[in-house]
Image (cartoon, helix red, strand yellow):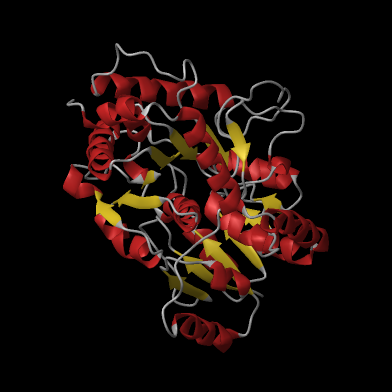
């Protein structure tokens, strides 16, 4: 089977797709990747062939920052790359409307790799779930609206979706978390499955980890790994970071992530880094402070580290609420009465947080998530395989 991975090229979306792709390649399938030029070295490091999205007209089309605005460009790039590769199946990321529509046009199946929690409406249940940020209903309707607008922009408005009123899942939507992170009693939609973390990241270069470790050893204080995501209109965490890590008990190694305005104070115990990997840094930390995106949350849990979460937008409030409910995190209330340093102290003293993080992380690590994902991809392909002559027509017909 020929499989084209066409996820968003940001690490939090690209790396899980590469984990699944590597397993599919191990099983003998032909796997290639459509990604932004900047992600080329990471894909090559994963041992998979890469096609550059920009060469297929996909400028910005696989950036998480631009996901809602470049669906048509993503559609065209995916369509061209899939035809060139002779793809039998696509694997993409949640929110990739262009890739979903390309699969419809090509009449081939598509599997979607999601986040660690379900973003949209449950099939049933979930009554009483506290409102954390936007409601599920609001998020679902907004994502369906953007999908419909992309369908119209690509000239497919007159064509009925083969997934009826739930076109965002493809043939299957794979969640990277654990059922314990979903709201108690809620039932996921039929095509949504938990597979586990799909953990993969590039290996550090020679001496990279040692250089960071040497810097941290100069202070000798316990380390807090801080992962900053996008602010989504929220306030910068830097003023509070500087206050918490100046003259306090902890030091911080701060992954700048997608934030663009690092402001460490001269006297703060802060080491600013920008690395394509985080595992070795979490290993050296006593806890993780993050905005509540999937990648650092899963990295912390897999290593049994408790979390302090300060969410802004997107899935951050939803995942933060799930982690607090599971007893593996505390939420930053962002009020003047609660200092960040005090919050970190409370996490450091709470052995129950660490115990539950180890238990949940142990469950996540116990199964082979890449194998689970590959099993679902293969089942989807078997169930969806059209007669060969129809398939060849579908991938070669002009559009």
The residue closer to the viewer here, 87 or 297, is 87
Is 343 rendered above or below residue 192? below
Residue at (55% x, 58% y) in the render = 199
| One can see residue 280 in this view | yes
Q: Nearer the viewer, residue 315 or 18?
A: 18
Coordinates of residue 346 in the picture (x, y in percent): 75, 61
Most extreme residue toward the top, as rendered?
158
Identify the residue at horizontal 69%, vertical 37% (top origin).
182
Q: Position of residue 61 (x, y in %)?
A: 28, 41
* Side (left or right) of 139 relative to 224: left
Quadrant containing the N terminus is top left
Q: Is the C terminus in the top left, top right, bottom left or bottom right quadrant?
A: top left
- Which residue is depicted at the point 62% across and 51% down? 336
Q: Is residue 106 left or right of residue 293?
A: left
Image coords of residue 2 (percent x, y): 37, 45
Quadrant of the image occupied by residue 208: bottom left
Q: Nearer the viewer, residue 225 or 394?
A: 394
Q: Is residue 6 visible?
A: no
Give whichever of 345, 106 is nearer the camera.
106
The residue at the point 68 percent across, 47 percent down is 323
């Amino acid at each position: 089977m020929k499989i084209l991975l066409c996820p968003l090229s940001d690490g939090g979306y690209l790396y899980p797709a590469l984990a699944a792709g590597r397993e599919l390649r191990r099983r003998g399938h032909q796997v290639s990747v459509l990604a932004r030029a900047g992600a080329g070295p990471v894909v090559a490091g994963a041992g998979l062939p890469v096609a550059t999205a920009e060469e297929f007209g996909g400028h910005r089309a696989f950036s998480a920052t631009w996901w809602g605005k470049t669906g048509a460009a993503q559609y065209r790039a995916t369509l061209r790359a899939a035809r060139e590769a002779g793809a039998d199946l696509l694997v993409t990321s949640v929110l990739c409307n262009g890739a979903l529509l390309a699969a419809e046009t090509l009449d081939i199946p598509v599997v979607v790799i999601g986040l660690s929690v379900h973003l949209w409406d449950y099939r049933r249940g979930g009554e009483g779930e506290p409102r954390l940020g936007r409601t599920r209903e609001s998020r679902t309707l907004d994502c369906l609206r953007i999908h419909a607008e992309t369908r119209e922009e690509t000239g497919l408005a007159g064509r009925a979706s083969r997934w009826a009123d739930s076109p965002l899942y493809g043939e299957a939507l794979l969640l990277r978390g654990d059922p314990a992170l979903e709201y108690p009693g809620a039932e996921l939609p039929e095509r949504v499955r938990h597979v586990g973390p799909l953990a993969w990241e590039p290996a550090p270069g020679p001496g990279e980890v040692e250089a960071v470790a040497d810097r941290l050893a100069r202070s000798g204080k316990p380390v807090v790994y801080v992962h900053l995501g996008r602010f989504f209109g929220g306030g910068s965490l830097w003023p509070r970071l500087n206050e918490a890590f100046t003259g306090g008990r902890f030091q911080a190694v701060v992954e700048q992530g997608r934030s663009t305005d690092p402001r460490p104070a001269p006297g703060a115990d802060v080491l600013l880094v920008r690395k394509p990997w985080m595992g070795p840094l979490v290993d050296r930390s006593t806890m993780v402070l993050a905005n509540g995106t999937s990648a650092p949350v899963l990295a912390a849990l897999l290593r049994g580290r408790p979390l302090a979460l300060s969410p802004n937008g997107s899935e951050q409030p939803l995942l933060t609420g799930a982690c607090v409910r599971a007893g593996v995190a505390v939420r930053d209330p962002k009020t003047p009465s609660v200092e960040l340093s005090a919050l970190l102290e409370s996490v450091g003293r709470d052995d129950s947080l660490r115990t539950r993080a180890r238990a949940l992380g142990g469950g996540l690590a116990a199964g082979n998530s890449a194998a689970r994902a590959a099993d679902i991809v293969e089942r989807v392909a078997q169930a969806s395989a059209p007669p060969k002559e129809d398939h060849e027509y579908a991938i070669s017909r002009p559009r």
